[in-house]
Image (spheres, rainbow, N blue to C red):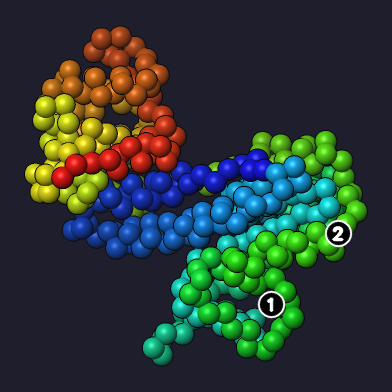
Amino acid sequence: MFIKPLEIPEHILFAKSMDRRTPASHSSKKTISNRAVNLLSGYKGESSMKYHLQFLPEDEFHILHYVRIPDLYGHFQIDFLILSRWFHLIMEVKNIYDNMNFDDMGQTYREIDGKVDVFANPVEQINMQQRRYLDWLRKHGFPLLPIEKIVVYSRDDTYLRNLTNDKIISDIVMHRDKVLSKIETLMNKHQSPLISEDHLMEISWRLLNEHVPEDADGMEKFGIDYSDLIKGVICPACSAVPMRWKSGKWWCPSCSCVSKTAHRPALADYALLAGDYINNRQARDFLQLKSIHTAKRLIQQENFQEFGKTSGRRYKIDIDKLVNDKVHNENAKVHT
């Protein structure tokens, strides 16, 4: 079962909001866009694994997505940590297209039209994660289980080339459709339970309690000021900005799309970039609304926590509520 379910981390949401709200003319736009694309690509690869992992027996496996644990050397991060009473499995997910070559010098690279892109060696990367996770288990006095590891390429069109037929690479590097059969092989390899169900749950909860999300790089790192941001509600159909509020709905002048909920991603952008407290004046400014009453109604219908009274009232924006799938699906129900 998913002890820590698949959710898009806040630093990736921040990068996405930064990209949406930074003008094309800003000197940092290209850097911001590239960073957002890379982070979202990585998360897309990880999210594609949910389908495969759901077939694991719920009563035998604890699955944790995106675990980032502090240690003596900083933090170590694991894309998926799959725990059982028989063994633990570290899974590193890569979402890279075209071909990936593994050579005899430990280099990993992609070659397209004569251009070579070199990547960090994922085998060494996951070896380091294994060492640090083992140290973490020892530190807390947990029983030591076999710690297995795999590197998974999530795209079906990635061509993996083990240039030297290295057995280690053949054993731990694979496409996503091989993951379940690999786990079955590991289950056959480790047939004796080494810890109790209580120990397994204790390890899972300790990992959850020690997880430290990655900090989002602030706007100042990219030379962005609040006044630089693109304000207004972004059209969910054509990405034009701003939409206009007309007759109880958002209307796009560019494509005539109509939506009742298009302001929700905008409120999430505000919370991620400017802070999670907002008052009526700030909401009107960011959503590009004229009416005090409309801004109040749109905010209060979200049932955010309220602080203060009358003109001093502020609302604490619940980012999780605004970015979950249900809200996104609802926001996608637009009319053109």
- Which quadrant of the structure image shows residue 146? bottom right
Residue at the (61%, 73%) spot, across then down: 121
User: Looking at numbered disc 1 in the image, what kind of residue is underneath it?
Assistant: Ile
Q: Secondary structure at mark 2?
A: loop
Q: Position of residue 303 (x, y in %)?
A: 37, 20
Which quadrant of the structure image shows residue 162? Answer: bottom right
Is residue 247 or residue 148 the one in the foreground? Answer: 247
The reply to whether discs 1 and 2 touch (Cβ–Cβ < 8 Å) is no
State the image coordinates of residue 92 (x, y, percent, origin top left): 62, 62
Which quadrant holds the C terminus? top left
Residue 1, horizontal then vertical, whole percent: 67, 43
Q: Quick one: label 1, few (<14), some, or many (20+) residues within 10 Å? A: some
Measure how far apart labels 1 and 2 are at the Cα level.
Answer: 21 Å
Q: Nearer the viewer, residue 297 or 269?
A: 297
76 or 62, which lies in front? 62
Circle 1: element type: helix
- The mark that comes first in sequence, 1 or 2, is 1
Residue depth check, mark 1 versus mark 2: number of the one nearer the observer: 2
Identity of the residue drawn at 31% across and 26% down: 278
- 157 versus 29 height, above or below: below
192 horizontally vs 319: left or right: right
Asked whether residue 232 is in view, the answer is no
Q: Residue furthest left?
A: 253
Write the residue at 32% across / 49% down.
Answer: 18
- Mark sitting on residue 169: 1
**Would you say residue 98 is visible in this rendering?**
yes
Q: Position of residue 31 (x, y in %)?
A: 33, 62
Query: Are there few (<14), some (14-19), or many (20+) residues within 10 Å of tag 2?
Result: some
Say what amino acid the circle numbered 2 marks. His
Q: Is residue 327 left or right of residue 43?
A: left
**Which label belongs to residue 190?**
2
Question: Is 187 on the left-hand or right-hand side of 287?
Answer: right
